[in-house]
Amino acid sequence: MKRLDDGVNAFLEPLRQSHATARLFTGASHVGDFSVVWHVAGLLYAIGSLDRLRNALALSIALGIESLVVNQGVKRLFKRDRPTWHGDDRTRVRKPRTSSFPSGHASSATFAAIVLTSFTGWPVAALWCTLAVIIAISRVVVRIHHFTDVLGGVVVGGLLGAVAIRVLALI
């Protein structure tokens, strides 16, 4: 795992050196904090429809549950140190309070992309997936997570997203 993490970290170093991409990924990391971008996306999707508003509220509630499961459950099982606790010096991000594995940003991004895709279908799903990938990778670029933390977050978010769309279909 260390070799993979180090290799991806070295591969992403040019993104940190570019002012434009460093800003892009720092911004992506910020909008992923507390799943803000996903709550906003749900509300924007809801404009003009009570049914879509119900979906947006369900998404926000589901994101809260996902966050509790990941941050207060799964992360407590692992005590992995972060690459840095303050992020790369070229980026400014919020100092995390939990362990590194799995990435909560990657988990919530994957989770939200799955749930939003179940609401909107294609081609809008391409937007959700692209945004999820950018937010997930941002955590490695800003050096708050190892690449394998992000992979773990994608797996956890995918599993929880699959459960969520089944549960939401019953409601």
Image (spheres, rainbow, N blue to C red):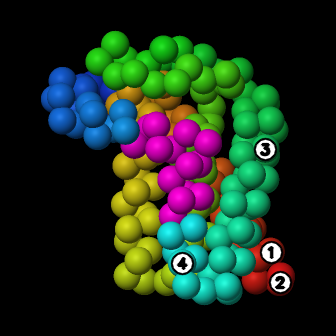
Q: Which mark is residue 118?
A: none
Task: State which region is magenta.
Answer: 28-41
Q: Quadrant of residue 161?
A: bottom right
**Closer to the camera in the image, 127 or 47:** 47
68 within the magenta span? no
For the residues labelled 3 and 2, the Cα–Cα distance comes to: 22 Å
For the residues labelled 1 and 3, the Cα–Cα distance comes to: 17 Å
Q: Position of residue 168 (x, y in %)?
A: 76, 76
Q: Residues within 10 Å of mark 1 (few under 14, many from 20)?
A: few
Q: Position of residue 148 (x, y in %)?
A: 50, 35
Q: Which mark is residue 47?
A: 4
If you read the primary sequence from the N terminus, does the residue marked by circle 1 or circle 3 appear first? Answer: 3
Q: Residues within 10 Å of mark 2 (few under 14, many from 20)?
A: few
If you read the primary sequence from the N terminus, does the residue marked by circle 3 or circle 2 appear first? Answer: 3
- Picture quarter with the C terminus: bottom right
Q: Residues within 10 Å of mark 4 (few under 14, many from 20)?
A: few
- Residue 152 visible from this viewpoint: no
**Dot 4 lies on which element?**
loop
Q: Which mark is residue 170?
A: 2
**Closer to the camera in the image, 159 or 32:** 32
Q: Which mark is residue 167?
A: 1
For the residues labelled 4 and 1, the Cα–Cα distance comes to: 24 Å
Residue type pointed to by label 2 = Leu
Residue type pointed to by label 3 = Leu
Q: Position of residue 16 (x, y in %)?
A: 25, 26
Instruction: Check whether the beta carbons of the residues at disc 2 and disc 1 lie within 8 A of each other.
Output: yes
> Is 111 on the left-hand or right-hand side of 18?
right
